[in-house]
Image (spheres, grey):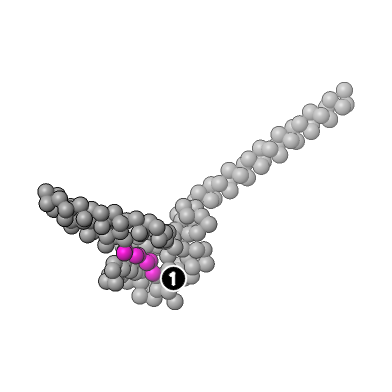
Amino acid sequence: MKFYGIMPEHKRWVRFSVAFIGIYICFTALTNPENWYYFPVGILIILCAFFWKQYIVDENGVDVRSTMVGIVNHNLWTWEEITSLHTDYEAAAPNVQCHFGKDVVTRTFVFNYDDSQAILKLAAEMNPDMYIDDMNEERRAELAENARKYREKIAAEKAKKRAEKRARKKK
């Protein structure tokens, strides 16, 4: 099964504007011979308007598929190459940010919660030696402990106020 990362999609008017700017730069470079060196820059800007990227996680590993003007480039990390997987439930809430590590290099993808849980199971199955961790586990435990202490403090203050009230009524 393939899991696709959540990516912000560029609006059509943004792509059109980028292509128009690239065409303008090329036109300016061609009409003014002194600025001929702007022509390659304009071509690159036009090509950027037709660039798409997809993040895919499947049985083969983690793949970044880049497409520019119909030319597809795959950058695949196999499960044997991946050494760690960390999940971050707070950075992209309500979605989950997954950090795939290969030696010192990290790729960060965003998935919905259900896909992230399926990816964790797939990763544990495909590479049992991989280090899998939750980045926010300690923080959530700390927040829960702080919340418990705060509730105890409030309860103690309320009990103290009730005791003071009773003492005033007895006088």
Measuring 54% from the left and 50% from the top, which residue is drawn there? 141
Position in image of residue 142 (x %, y %): 53, 47
**128 or 69, which lies in front?**
69
Span colored in magenta: 50-56
Measuring 58% from the left and 46% from the top, which residue is drawn there? 145
> Mark 1 falls on what kind of element?
strand
Visible residue check, residue 71: yes
**67 or 73, which lies in front?**
67
Does the magenta portion include 52? Answer: yes
Q: Residue under label 1, please give it.
A: 3
Within the image, what quadrant is residue 77 found in?
A: bottom left
Q: Furthest residue to the front?
A: 31
Within the image, what quadrant is residue 61 found in?
A: bottom left
Tag 1: Cα neighbours inside 10 Å, few (<14), some, or many (≥20)?
some
Does the magenta portion include 99? Answer: no
Looking at the rendered image, the quarter that the C terminus falls into is: top right
Q: Furthest residue to the top?
A: 171
Position in image of residue 91 (x %, y %): 46, 52
Disc 1 marks a residue whose amino acid type is Phe
Side of 43 where 120 appears, left or right? right
Q: Is residue 74 above or below residue 144?
A: below
Visible residue check, residue 82: no
Main secondary-structure element of the magenta-colored stretch: strand
Measuring 38% from the left and 56% from the top, which residue is drawn there? 14
**170 or 15, which lies in front?**
15
Side of 166 where 102 appears, left or right? left
